Amino acid sequence: MGCSTVGFVDDFFDIFAAQAQRNGLEQTVLKFQKRFDQDEIDTYVQEYQKRAESVRVGYPPKILAAPGMKPWYPGPLADDPYWMPYAEFLKQQKRWPKDRLKVLDEASSKVIAFTNDPSHATFLTKGLVVGYVQSGKTTNYTAVIAKAADVGYRLIIVLSGIHNGLRRQTQERLAEQLLARKDDGWFTLTSVDSDFEEQNTKAAAYLHQSGTGVTLCVVKKNHLRLERLIEWLRPAGQAGSFVDLPVLIIDDEADQASVDTATINPQIRQLINLFDKRTYLGYTATPFANVLIDPSAEDLYPETFILSLPQPDGYFGAEKIFGREAVEGEATGSDLDGHDMVRIVPDNTVNLLRPSRRADTPDFAPTMTKDLTAAVRYFWMATAARRCRGDYEHSTMLVHPSMQTVVHEAYRAPLLQMQQNMVDALDDCDEEVLEQLRRQWEEESRKVPAAQFGNRFIPFDDLLEHLPDVVAQTDVVLDNHRSRDRLDYTGDPVVAIAVGGNTLSRGLTLEGLVVSFFVRSARTYDTLLQMGRWFGFRPGYEDLPRIWMTKQLKEYFRHLATVEHEIRLDIRRYEEENIPPSEVGVRIRTHPVLNVTAKMGRARTAYASYGGRRVQTRYFRESDLDWLVDNLEAARTLVGDALRDGASLQDRGTGEVLLRNVDVRHVLRFVDNYQVHEDSPDLEPRLIHAYIEKENRRSPQSLLSWTVAVMGGPVPDARHLVKFDEQVQVGTVHRSKLKDSGGEKADIKTLMTKEHRVIDMDVPAAEARRKSEEGLVALRNDHPDFQDQGLLLLYPIAKDSPPDEANQETRRPLEAVEHVIGAAFIFPGNSKDKVANRYVQVGIDHQAIDPAEYADAASALNDEADDA
């Protein structure tokens, strides 16, 4: 994976490029002028700069970079002593395909390219690299370390989480993948078994003895370890010994302990300030706290760049498992659904699985509930199925009930007893147990077909041959800060049920994770996402992973998938507009229950737009009669008042009735009276009201006139007739609910179809379906009759709506106590029109916000905060 050829150069170019990487371009030019003609040197300089620029602008990934930084890094060279052996290791021993290696090469090169040239006299780079949970962030920074060593960095410090397990795992990986590839180039201050200790040799002497080699130090984020490291380095720094020493500090899990803490945060800043030439790179999958650090303080805010790593091929993240909401510019559709891999743990059994109060913890004894039993049984069968496919690698089940170690210990006996019972049942060929296993396996195989991922379906009778060995070989491992029996993947393949809490919820990779049983509660985005050890790669068994969790937790993770997606869209948009992190903050969508992070830093209300968007109701209280009746009355009042005020009526003859030229006063009254489920993130009535009024005041004015579309159907019988007015009587439409929703929150998922976005414009349905969302927005914005007009759609939904035949597996009848009114708003305009929405972002001093323009929206949010 050497530097690609962009133009013709001779064999001396690699020598020139290597010298330029080490000593800087200007010094290299001066040196070459003694032996080469100026024309040859000019050719080398042009080629070097061309390659350096191609690294910066290449794809992937996306970066927000500080302005004014000159390209200096042309990518790796064919004889680079650190990167090339690592790339060869991945290719030969890890059997990485060429395309995957190419993506890693490009992504890591771009990180290096947006740091400062290490040949400069002094510099400070502060960047943030955002990956996905369990997605290969360690691999990326391993490549960055190798390339940093190639360009002249001589001290690499890796701050590796707060737990010994993660520090040890990181040291093991770097030792295997970097140190073992080049014995004569590395010096180490730490080992697999030893964190940083006091050194016999002073720092200046040690680093002098290492010569042109590279020193690696992997340190846990512990105040005693960091204090020892700082005190060892400080005398050399004060003596000026680090003037010519480029230092790279990698902060793994950079949102943990590094942000807004009394001890670790100041120590990291002290460490950075010991050096004259330093690059600080934070790596995290949950950047919420990092992007809310005060940029005006001398802190760790990533002022130089923010990078969003591409999602690797074959990666299973929150979006694939839980799905996500549609965001600006997207249509709601089945492609936003996750795979059917989540099984719901009933709320009334949670107290049997974890103590409900701290006082109950010492004497807590878990119950092997129906769901926990099913999860363990499925784990054994899935592991046996992997063996049928020739996969005898590590296989793990995670049980995460609580952070209390005494609770973990309480699980050992019942799990071991269940294991023994299953061994006995298989030895005795217990027909009842075998039939239960068969039914469960066949049902799970139907829900997630193996063929969907190109895998071979495994019949129950085939996996049964391997099942006794799998069950007998299973180890129950308690992995927490007090336990002695930790997960160890360094030997032969293991089959393990790991019970744990915090030590299993940050950074640590659970090899071959197949099943997760997760009932621990958490209230912040970052904590929840980091607990998601089920994210990652599942080659050859993509169809087998399953998660057992509560319905509420499933909803939380779906919201977080949306948050992740939007953050990366923000980063991409800012890069396209060439806006650096020092000038604008990344927005983070908020949630009515969850906190973004415990470290809110300099967070403030951000601004989002309804311009060009469609927002629609998705959740309903189908058992709340007053709620449903009030919404029916709000819709009837809107239609009746609009007609009495002179709105024109267009009956399309199919149960769809359009009211044109409806005055905005009637729409605003409907917005105020219509009740929206509190979990609807985009459809906030007070914010919509504020946005409409803002558009009414702007010049030229907008949204003064509306079309109201009643989206009913033919009338099959009197029970399914909804009377909005004497002139508007239509039949109901069907919208069933998802199977795992209901009670306080019926989820119909999709209210409107794509062509309804332009139903007021008389665009043929087939033509509308062919257009993209952006195309439909443009169609409205470019039409003089509709570019300033709003569209409100009302859907009378039958209370007994059945699921379609094709959706019997995933949906069930709505079963509401009254007919339901769904509402959707279509706004003209574009997303640059702003109004307060449910987001936060870091405050940048020079970000100008016009208080008058957003006064009403800000007031709405303040009222909401007071109510909370």
Image: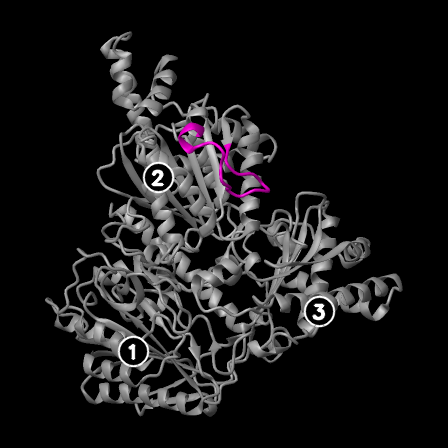
Mark seen at residue 279: 2
Say which residue label 3 marks.
373
- Is 404 covered by the magenta stretch? no
Q: Position of residue 537 (x, y in %)?
A: 57, 49
Q: Which class describes the residues within 10 Å of circle 1: few (<14), some (14-19), or many (20+)?
A: few
Q: How many marks?
A: 3
| Residue stretch in magenta | 188-206
Identify which residue is drawn at 57% across, 50% down: 165
Which amino acid type corresponds to the residue marked 1 in the rendered image? Answer: Glu
Identify the residue at the far right of this view.
Answer: 428
Nearer the N terminus, badge 2 or badge 3? 2
Say what secondary structure mark 2 lies in: strand
The residue lying at 73 percent from left, 45 percent from top is 390
Circles 1 and 3, Cβ within 8 Å, touching? The answer is no
The residue pinned by badge 1 equals 864
Q: Is residue 310 visible?
A: no
Task: State the image coordinates of residue 473 (x, y, percent, origin top left).
Answer: 77, 54
